[in-house]
């Protein structure tokens, strides 16, 4: 049973913050999933939404704000008083934390309308190269297949995962086109036949975002390799309980 902490330990700390990533590490997670887009001064920052309203005390589009402006926002107070003054992290800060806490990072390349695909990919690439991050520590994912094609050409050593809501009929062609490592789909719409086809074709299969293990009990039997969840502690608690039962039965 493998899990990824979606936007960090986002049920325990404000999503996509260093606090959430530290929570994931404290829980013993091997992977975190993050969303990366650019500030107006071309710094890769970790935030999901196109605007800052939902998860900070500010307003406006991420792409219209400088890094200093984004850093001036409180990204934690909305979640709870204990997270007051938590800030939007940069990709660089996140990867340094991941290195220090032995976390692997699923970088979702987040593109909204009017965003510059090449510029975003180039800035992400530069941070990874400058920090000399091991390729095995990173997985790129995106709903935008052109972004994955770009990374396939410019950083082929880093694995790529195609994000879809529902699995299209031509999924195997799409995966082959980007020499994908994995397919990431919404667990709600996944069918057993589809799962078995993906696995038979040699790809890893990840599901988002089941927040209760009971929602995907059958999915493991279908061959799903990883659950991307806001509540990794629920899965870890099951693993801990199963190990306890095994030890006490011997």
Image (tube, grey):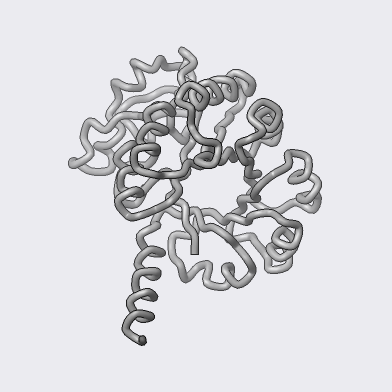
Q: Residue at x 53, y 25 (%)?
A: 124
Vertical arrangement, residue 155 with respect to residue 183, above or below = above
Q: Position of residue 154 (x, y in %)?
A: 66, 26
Q: Residue at x 34, y 80 (%)?
A: 247
Q: Position of residue 61 (x, y in %)?
A: 46, 23
In the image, 106: left or right of 171?
left
In the image, 148: left or right of 249?
right
In the image, 221: left or right of 179?
left
Q: Residue at x 68, y 63 (%)?
A: 195
Q: Residue at x 37, y 28 (%)?
A: 93
Comparing 10 with 113, the one in front is 10
Q: Position of residue 53 (x, y in %)?
A: 38, 31
Q: Position of residue 90 (x, y in %)?
A: 40, 26
Vertical arrangement, residue 247 with respect to residue 222, above or below = below
Quadrant of the image occupied by residue 119: top right
Comparing 225 with 54, the one in front is 225
Q: Residue furthest top?
A: 41
Q: Quadrant of the C terminus?
A: bottom left
Q: Residue furthest bottom?
A: 249
Q: Residue furthest left?
A: 82
Vertical arrangement, residue 175 with respect to residue 60, above or below = below
Quadrant of the image occupied by residue 237: bottom left
Question: How many numbered marks does the figure carry?
Answer: 0
Comparing 58 with 101, the one in front is 101
């Amino acid at each position: 049973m493998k899990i990824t902490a979606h936007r960090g330990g986002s049920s325990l700390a404000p999503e996509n913050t260093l606090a959430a990533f530290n929570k994931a590490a404290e829980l013993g997670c091997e992977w975190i999933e993050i969303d990366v887009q650019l500030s107006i001064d071309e710094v890769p920052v970790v935030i999901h939404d196109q605007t800052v309203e939902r998860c900070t005390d500010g307003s406006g589009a991420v792409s219209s704000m400088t890094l200093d402006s984004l850093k001036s926002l409180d990204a934690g107070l909305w979640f709870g008083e204990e997270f007051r003054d938590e800030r939007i992290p940069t990709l660089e800060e996140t990867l340094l934390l991941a290195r220090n806490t032995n976390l692997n990072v699923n970088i979702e390349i987040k593109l909204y309308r009017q965003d510059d695909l090449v510029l975003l990919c180039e800035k992400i690439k530069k941070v990874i190269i400058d920090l000399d991050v091991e390729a095995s520590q990173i997985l790129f994912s995106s709903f935008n297949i052109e972004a994955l094609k770009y990374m396939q050409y410019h950083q082929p050593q880093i694995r790529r995962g195609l994000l879809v809501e529902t699995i299209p009929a031509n999924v195997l062609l799409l995966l082959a086109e980007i020499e994908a490592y994995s397919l990431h789909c919404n667990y709600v719409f996944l069918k057993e036949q589809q799962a078995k086809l993906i696995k038979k074709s040699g790809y890893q299969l990840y599901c988002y975002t089941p927040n209760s293990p009971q929602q995907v009990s059958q999915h493991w039997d279908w061959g799903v390799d990883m659950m991307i969840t806001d509540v990794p502690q629920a899965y870890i608690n099951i693993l801990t309980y199963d190990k306890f039962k095994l030890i006490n039965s011997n």
